Amino acid sequence: MGVQLDFRLLGTLEVLADGGRVAVSGPRQRTVLAMLLLSADRVVSVDSLVEAVWNGSPPATGRTQVAICVAALRKTFKAAGCADDVIVTTSPGYQLVSRGHRIDAAEFDNRVVAAHQAAEQGNHVEAADMYSAALELWRGPALAGVAGYPAETEAARLEEQRLAAYESFSALRLELGQHRALISELAALVREHPLREQARGQLMLAQYRAGRRAEALETFRGGRESSIEEVGIEPGPALRDLHDAILRDDPALTLVRPAAVGSTVVPAQLPPAPPAFTGRAAELSVLDDLLTEQTAVAVVTGPGGVGKTGLALHWAHRAAERFDDGQLYVDLRGYHDGTPADSAAVLGSLLRALGVTNEQIPADPTERATLYRSMLDGRRVLIVLDNARNFAQVRPLLPGNGRCRVLVTSRSPLGELVGGHVAVAVRLGVFDNDEAAAMLNNVIGADRVDGDPAGVARLTELCDHLPLALQIAGTRLASRPHWTVRRLVTRLEDRSRRLDELDGDGTGPRASMEASYRALEPQAQRLYRRLGLITSPDFAAWVGAAVLDVGLEEADELIEQLVEARLLEVSPGTGTRYHFQDLVRLHAREHALAEESPQQRDSACERALAGWLTLAVEAHWRSAGRTPHTLRSRPAWRLGKEHVDTLLLDPDSWLDQEQTALRSAMVHASRLRMEDLAHGLTSLAIIPTSRDADPAYELCVARTG
């Protein structure tokens, strides 16, 4: 047979063979070929071909010239590699044999028929895909470049088929909730065909469902004017009824799934409760408010690894029997190595859990949220939204009725949720010593805990009292019964290895902090890294300005980002000072060593140390009118005067507050071999009560004289 020929009528008439174009020369050959293709596998009389080529006014040689055109087409097809005759002579004319070849118009018809059948069977998604595939065959106006009245008539017929298929396709897309995407397409179609009332009605419905009611009414008015002006009649009853329904906001216009959908499904999606849950009695009591009529939402916030998910699941399992219509759970991956979960995708998952089939789930996110609320209406379901990134991610997932209850966990405070809804907030902190000992008791046994209380206390301290770190430490001890608590403590004392020791196969504190770090904007990441280099136990916001060499206002904003990400803590009782947990500081320092050059690290530290020095000199001047140290050169960094005045309103109080920080800065400068800074800070730092208790101080004094 040879190559397959690809005949294309839905656009400019084309013939392809093996992907290459086959030239059909001359308008007569194109007309003859078009007429044969339109009646493929049927005989077309010579008289019909003559009529098509010459529009009823043929020359005396018309039949001969048609035969010449057919002969030329046969020669062209054989030259393209087609061994068999594509056009055969059959009285009273010719027949194009389509077997083994492709005709796009015939393929279009087949796809439309299949789409129609799928739609009738209720397979709307599949049907929409089939209609889309059929319409993709069109490259432009049918039979473009083919002249003659018969060809024009056939082109008009094909165009009507295309429009009818598109309207059927649009109807399905409206059912699937794709009204927003349809608006621009239908608007263009209506402009080109203003009298097509079905398309106009679909545009009106799409606009109405997208919240553009006024535009829907204007679309009707435009259609009515066109109908009266061009054909002298009012629009048909279907369009008028739709207009009236829009005017009265008829609920039937809203896309609503059948009430029976999913009504028998009772989801039970809660993951297993944590096996060694410990403490949190006060927090559990607060969550019990969800079982009352006054509270609909609870938000558990706290830093990574503090046990938010464990608390939520423990309470959810304890309260599950109070929710007869089921429990939904979803990990929103707000702080995760990958991208946070998309709310629209989550809605699809929740709808499936409620018994809605894939083809019944709208594509439009707003319509998904509407259906989700409809499915929950009148039901009592517990919804656990774990690891949320922000309020925007949570908002579409909130039910619309007062019987459901929602439990959200997040590192972010989610102030919009707590402030704007009937919600309680649980701010989860780290374990106290008793809670930490109780957790370790559950994991490694009472004998090992009671046998070394001092070791357990030190282990808790090295884990920052963080439940995740303590769980991993306890698991390591449980899997190594020959280890003492003191042995693990010794390993954790090495600050360079501590995060590695608590890695937990990539699920430990480092992974948790890494997710928060990656979620920061670049400048906030830079601040986090550089603050990790500062050795002071706590610090004021100006230190952030110094390490970044930016204004205090910008540093304030960035510090708040770190606080909201729970990577930086507000020091208790101050409101204006901040500190790292030790594990977080180690993580920040790791990034500084990996991502900052030695010069960048030293410069950041030098600016911060210079800030402490200049502020201490100024504080001494304002307090006593003199200073034990005189600046001999321009400092690497200095805080603006207006901010200095604010900080040093009470210079003696500032010096008292900064005593520990000044001593830390003094030692830090000495270790960095910044001798001028070390000397100045040593002369200004308040001498500890017992120098013997501070070897670092003695070393610094020895180095600086």
Image (cartoon, rainbow, N blue to C red):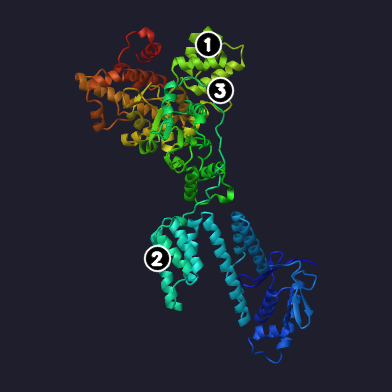
Taking the image as shown, residue 342 lies to the left or right of residue 420, namely right
Crowd rating for badge 3 (residues with CA inside 10 Å; few <14, some 14–19, many 20+): few
Q: Name the quadrant containing residue 128.
A: bottom right
Q: In this view, does 110 lie above or below 260?
A: below
Residue 625 or residue 578, whichever sits in front: 578
Crowd rating for badge 2 (residues with CA inside 10 Å; few <14, some 14–19, many 20+): few
Q: Which of marks 1 and 3 is nearer the N terminus?
A: 3
- Quadrant assignment for the N terminus: bottom right
Q: What residue type is labelled 2?
A: Glu
Q: In this view, does 359 lie above or below 149?
A: above
Where residue 449 is drawn, which disc sits there?
1
**Residue bearing mark 2:** 218
The CA distance from mark 2 to mark 3 is 62 Å
Which residue: 65% across, 83% down?
Answer: 52
Where residue 275 is drawn, which disc sits there?
3
Residue 547 or residue 399, whichever sits in front: 399
Which residue: 75% across, 82% down?
Answer: 93
